[in-house]
Image (cartoon, coloured by chain):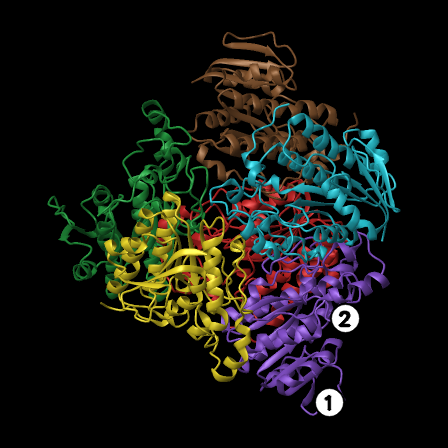
Chain colours: A brown, B red, C purple, D cyan, E green, F yellow
């Protein structure tokens, strides 16, 4: 059991899920978000914080022995918003960790770092990036910062390229990209408790029959996802119209993000 | 459920099996063969057709929303026979599909496209061909036609390099090459119903412990074979003499085909 | 010096060139074509022959210690024409060689076996085929036949994927694909005289600065092309309009062949 | 000859060199920098511009048919400086290009994107990044933006991972990393004039005997560097003490950048 | 069932285990060791033998149809000891086999052939060696001898790079390296009974969630390990202190062997 | 210029050549062999030494700042001879170096470590070993010892897999394998003088048109061979009968070594 896990972006959809699932694994969950959280549980504390504020982030990280970094923007937005939350924000976090004992960081990266690959291509974690928006670009930046702090200072990170972390898969594409909350939780704990984490990319997907991504390189962590989108396939096939092969949601791994324009500030 | 699946070569051993297993998946099975089929079931229709006859093939494909192309010759024969059935035949089929709405094609390719690899070599779908006879060469031709029609016209195909599709494995080599009828059926339906098929090579093998071929690139189709030749291993070990390591059936992936001469017309 | 080199397709443009350049390397050049050749030189003999005629091809090959197989069709045509000349033709040639001492065969394959790769992709000889027409498909067939006769009978071949063999490069694309007659000739002789040829793919390109293809695997033959399309680059840049990046002649390795329809018989 | 090439960062050391060498290749060189340039030649114009100012960058790019983007910071600095010049700056540039006809962009990326590889490792352009500082991270960001604008809008770029572009190599490490001004110039012009550029990484190194980087994938551009650091090796060996194998300048490709701390704002 | 399996090194810990588990698979187990074994079972015979004694080893192998070669030294020792037991010993064994019908050999190789790879690296059997001591070097020698006798004489071998074969995993590292006696036994029998064994490297690990090594190339043997160290993970996590990421037992695949000095004779 | 280079095996054919060519590069050449050398030059000293004698080797290495290890047996011999000279010998050398300041070692490895690859295969330095005799096995052992001392102690080595180092190529195979004395010398000096050597495999071949081996990974050393066997090709073709494609000298990279039996002690 860990002493204190920091969850940034804890007020978001993913943060709300992880507050539940991580509860048994730490004496304290330190929650942080730019939005206030008021329904704190007994082992939860809250620190309101704009991730773009370097000094605030430093206080935030102090005293934690693990960080789950969900903070920042998770959809396509304009450069100014992305810059503050996802570029400056991730830099602030790694600087704070460097100055406070280098707790392991689980960085919520994204499939949108490689969104322009086709869905009939299988990827290794070493394949070159193909981002599908400024959001994806910002996650590449974050992975690069993590790599830098690992090589220069020994900071350990899991770079989790999350597919779609929702209670259950909701459309055809999620049959490939779904990461169940249970599997995400066990991945986080595997990364926190492995003797050696290094700076390791992990594709954030459950054990989906239709998965696109090869996680064999990360087997040393011992993470074996338990859920499979296949259990929901019948329901989706019945209720969601099947996209054609050239629709962006069936053609590209990034799905509709590839249809997004560049948002203007 | 599909409207009308065309099965070419429907009178053959494999066709006879698939008539049963595909029945629940289409309103109509349009059967075709050079040999007449008389025992038609309620949702079956029959069109006698020589696959080498281009005009006839055109009529055949019209109105189908999926094609399982088993037609042609499936053993080593002389060039004239192979040419008519497997070269001209496959060209006719793709031309017909191009002119009739491009239904997806499941092309019965073969392990004999790579039969001269040794059995202690594991293959990816991108490894160069090593055919073991004119039959194998003709299947390479077929895969090349499929690739051409995909790149030029967007025609989608599954190129299934079938190992040995029989009710159960019958000899030592089939412990590696067996494709159960059930697994072939589920592969066909996965290819027909996936949002995007592209032009994808799939090794036609069940989940055999002793398999030689890596299907990981095709995981996006969501096809997970359920059968395993291992269930029959004891029986084969008991009843079939074990071949020596330099016997063609144990040395080469194509087995006895590597012992065949070139058949003369 | 060789005793008798057979050149099939000797009346064509490429054959006409090689009659000159191969003259010093053999006591006799046996020329063959469906079209009569009348201007025979002193060490030349002519045998009129339709490559689709198996018996005729057998006589043709007898007594030769090397074959340069240019015969057949070298542009996009309908299936019937391609079938006779390039499918049946190449089968006939390998059968004839098998029955007459297995002289080494230089097979004129083509870049159109891989014509749908983009020009900004660098290829190895082991990359999967991507043909751009029935012509390209027929050359894949020929390479497969050569592989078969090598594995089954030990027949040695050079599979020369010719780019563009003309006296000099004539357009922007040929700055990448050009194979000078001098370099083709030295390649043929390297393949004929190497102690071991095996069944080796060689990209038929001169030492062009802008080349797309990696020939390093074939270095054992000792062939080092001497010409470079760069010597003609200024002239082409001055006289030929530069294509845009999405024009087929600049986008695909197969150039305009990718624009061709399927020719109908 | 081009109409108008924009050089950003034209007042810097590299910009000053390229003003000379690019002069013959364009009717006009539009120079830009945050620092004023006063010694303008006859075909030069100057526009003072802070690359972090999006509106200003838009005017800057308008009317240019090629951009050499040297602007921004080229050494390790604190996040605020890097952010304005190298993150926001590169975004501004690509947005401006998108809105003004998509002139090709030569982006001055850097070896510091991969600085933590050892000098006894040979790299391909597809190897994962290993940045050695925030500067290197910012160049990864820039390459990701270029990739995005290529996949989404067709913007073409050369991503030149410059080693050390100086008049001559000055130390042991530069024997591997040197890019002569002449070779950089010919690379720029090859990228501007090739029929198709795509979005291509090019290692910015001369034809150095001791080079670390494999440029074979980019041969299609026809760029063949002419200079070789070897011509200066004797001089360097005589005048510069040889570093030991574990000194950062001999161990890591990024050299002394790997010794830099994170600069604080 | 086999006639006579020779187990060298039968008095050791591993030999003692295999005497039990191999008993049902052979009419006779011929045991050999430098140390006397006295508790022979009904189908066991014992031949005392120093593996460094070539003549003695010849007698030993005669009449066996399978050899499990555990003999020699299995920890880091000085060169003289390693030389006699592991260099001369393995040579003696292969010579003996060559002269006595070439029974298949299961050679107990070791993870210490690659001990200097990090634990966050996943290995293929073709990755270059990185031995962590003279013991590891001696096992590389043994694998090289096996390869030689295969290519020159057709001798078949399984080169089992054993992780840690103990009744159950005993520390954190063994969660990755554990090979259960049951799985080792089934691997031995798979190698003895496969129609073709060749000269195949197999990573000797159970189906551990945390495994480091890719055995997919050896699937043709049909060996599917049944045990998983994960069943013991809770116990180990509870009772054994977790090593830090830079401890040799967590950093290197060879674990503490990387801390060993070179032992002096 | 170096202070003192030790050449072991200095009385051999290769040693005799290198005494000449290395003379200008060191103040002193310390020569060593089991055979006495009497014709010492002014900057040469001689120490008679059996490489199998560990204590003697220790004295030998003391005071040297570079070692060229040619000592030992360089043809196929029986195990006893190979063991003393090439197994124990190389161990003795690395132990001596470890105890005397770790001078860089140029280890004369051999193409016979990979002799069973075919001549139409191109090798990278990372391809698995395929030795063609006990001699080749002993060189694999030597490379493994070098790797061990590098990872454990930082000892730097060049592992030169020598093809055929003779004044000029003497047969067809040497057109591929020839390493001119001049090129070997420049390689030795490149390895001694590079800032970082690491533990690097280098294929010991001149710039032969017909070369089999890819040295691109070692470009960082700046070694560019100047000689080319092609200059002797005409002479060899005229005077040496051309071997057939299945003769061992044309089929296997190891040539006649593949025909050797195992020599008996």
Q: Does residue B224 lie above or below E7 as drawn?
A: above
Decide: few, some or many residues near mark 1? Use Cα within 10 Å; few <14, some 14-19, many ≥20: few
Q: Which residue is located at x 44 percent, y 57 percent?
A: B119
> Could you say which is closer to the camera, residue C203 or residue C77?
C203
Position in image of residue E195 (x %, y %): 36, 57
Q: Which residue is mark 1?
A: C40
Q: Does residue A47 lie above or below C90 as drawn?
A: above
Q: Does residue B165 lie above or below C156 as drawn?
A: above
The answer to whether mark 1 and mark 2 are in CB contact below 8 A is no
Q: Nearer the viewer, mark 1 or mark 2?
A: 2
Q: Does residue F97 lie above or below F203 as drawn?
A: above
Residue C7 at least partly seen = yes
Q: Which residue is mark 2?
A: C168
User: Which quarter of the figure is the C terminus of chain B placed in?
Assistant: bottom right
Position in image of residue E193 (x %, y %): 32, 54
Q: Chain of mark 1?
A: C
Left or right, residue B205 beside residue D23: left
> Could you say which is closer to the camera, residue B153 or residue E50?
E50
Left or right, residue F98 beside residue F203: left
Residue A204 at least partly seen = no
Q: Which residue is located at x 54 percent, y 64 percent?
A: B131
């Amino acid at each position: 059991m860990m002493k204190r896990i920091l969850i940034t972006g804890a007020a978001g959809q993913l943060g709300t899920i992880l507050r539940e699932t991580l509860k048994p694994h730490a004496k304290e969950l330190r929650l942080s978000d730019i939005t206030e959280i008021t329904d704190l549980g007994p082992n939860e504390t809250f620190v309101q914080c704009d991730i773009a504020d370097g000094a605030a982030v430093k206080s935030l990280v102090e005293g934690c022995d693990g960080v789950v970094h969900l903070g920042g923007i998770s959809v396509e937005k304009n450069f100014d918003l992305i810059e503050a939350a996802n570029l400056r924000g991730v830099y602030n976090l790694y600087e704070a960790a460097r100055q406070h004992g280098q707790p392991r960081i689980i960085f919520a990266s994204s499939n949108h770092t490689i969104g322009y690959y086709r869905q009939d291509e299988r990827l290794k974690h070493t394949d070159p990036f193909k981002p599908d928006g400024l959001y994806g670009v910002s996650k590449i930046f974050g992975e690069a910062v993590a790599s830098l702090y690992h090589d220069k200072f020994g900071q350990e990170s899991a770079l989790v390229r999350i597919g779609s972390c929702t209670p259950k898969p909701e459309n055809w594409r999620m049959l490939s990209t779904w990461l169940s909350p249970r599997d995400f939780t066990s991945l986080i704990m595997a990364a926190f408790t492995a003797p050696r984490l290094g700076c390791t990319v992990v594709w954030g997907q459950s054990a989906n029959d239709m998965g696109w991504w090869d996680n064999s390189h990360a087997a040393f962590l011992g993470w074996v996802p338990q859920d499979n989108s296949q259990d929901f396939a019948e329901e989706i096939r019945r209720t969601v119209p099947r996209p054609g092969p050239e629709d962006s949601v069936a053609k590209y791994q990034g799905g509709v993000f590839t249809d997004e324009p560049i948002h203007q500030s």
